[in-house]
C-alpha cells in the first residue's frame, strides 16, 4: 500500500501509512517517497515526452471560469468538515492542507501566510529530513527488501505519471475543450 502511495509521491501519507502498517520500513519508505519528489524534474519529462506529440504539448488551455473569493474560502472549510465526518483518521493531515489554503485565500493573516509558505516550510523540511534520517539504520536500509521498495517506488511513480498523461489524452477524445496532456502528470501530488 505504501508503494502505491509513493507512486503518487505523497510523502506524508506514505510515512503515516508505513508507520501504521510496517514501522520497520518507515525509514526506507520515507526516503523513497521524498527522493522521488526531489527527482520529479528527472523522472517525469522523459515519460511525458515519450507519450505526447509536439502538437499535443503546444495545446493552450482556456480558463473555463474564474473562481470567486467566497469559493476559495469555503473550499477548505467544507473539505475539512467532510473529511472529519467521513475519514476522521485523515482529518489531521488534510486539516493542515485546509488551514494553509484558508490562511492564504482569506488574506487576513498575510504576514503569517507568507512565513508559512517560505521560511517555516524550509525549517519543517529540515526537521522532517533529520527525523526520517534518524529512523533509517544502514544495516536495515541496504537489504533486498528495502532496495525492492526503492525500485517498485520509482516504477509506481513512473506509472502514475504515465497514467495521468494518458488520461488527459483520453479526455481529449471526448471533450470539446482540448486539454494539454502534460497537465495529467500533475495528478502525481508532488507536482502542485
Image: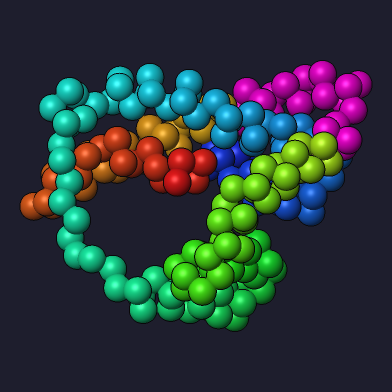
Q: What residue is at 64 percent from the left and 36 percent from the top?
A: 33
**Where residue 142 sits in the image (x, y, percent)?**
82, 18
Query: In this figure, which colouring scheme has been used for the structure?
Result: rainbow
Left or right of 132, for residue 185: left
Query: What secondary structure is the magenta-colored segment mainly?
Result: helix
Tell me if 11 is positioned left or right of 192 in this view: right
Identify the residue at image location x=77%, y=19%.
144
Whether residue 170 is visible to the viewer of this picture, yes or no, is: no
Q: Is residue 145 magenta?
A: yes
The magenta-colored residue range is 132-153
In this rendering, the answer to whether 9 lies above or below 32 is below
Q: Quadrant of residue 148?
A: top right
Q: Can residue 115 be seen here?
A: yes
Please tell me which residue is depicted at 76% across the width and 26% down the height of the picture. 146
Q: Is residue 147 magenta?
A: yes
Residue 122 picture location, percent across and down: 67, 42
Q: Is residue 136 above or below residue 183?
A: above
74 sits left or right of 34 in the view: left
Direction from residue 181 to residue 173 in the image, left or right: left
Amino acid at each position: 500500500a505504501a508503494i502505491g502511495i509513493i507512486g503518487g509521491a505523497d510523502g506524508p501519507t506514505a510515512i503515516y501509512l508505513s508507520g501504521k502498517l510496517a514501522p520497520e520500513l518507515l525509514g526506507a519508505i520515507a526516503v523513497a517517497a521524498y527522493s522521488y519528489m526531489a527527482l520529479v524534474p528527472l523522472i517525469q519529462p522523459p515519460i511525458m515526452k515519450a507519450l505526447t506529440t509536439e502538437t499535443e504539448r503546444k495545446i493552450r488551455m482556456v480558463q473555463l471560469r474564474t473562481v470567486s473569493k467566497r469559493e476559495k474560502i469555503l473550499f477548505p472549510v467544507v473539505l475539512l468538515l467532510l473529511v472529519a465526518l467521513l475519514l476522521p483518521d485523515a482529518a489531521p493531515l488534510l486539516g493542515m492542507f485546509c488551514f494553509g489554503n484558508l490562511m492564504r485565500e482569506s488574506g487576513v493573516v498575510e504576514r503569517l501566510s507568507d512565513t508559512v509558505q517560505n521560511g517555516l516550510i524550509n525549517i519543517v523540511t529540515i526537521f522532517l529530513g533529520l527525523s526520517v534520517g534518524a529512523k533509517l539504520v544502514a544495516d536495515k536500509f541496504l537489504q533486498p527488501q528495502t532496495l525492492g521498495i526503492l525500485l517498485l517506488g520509482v516504477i509506481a511513480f513512473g506509472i502514475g505519471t504515465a497514467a495521468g498523461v494518458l488520461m488527459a489524452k483520453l479526455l481529449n477524445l471526448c471533450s470539446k475543450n482540448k486539454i494539454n496532456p502534460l497537465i495529467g502528470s500533475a495528478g502525481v501530488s508532488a507536482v502542485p
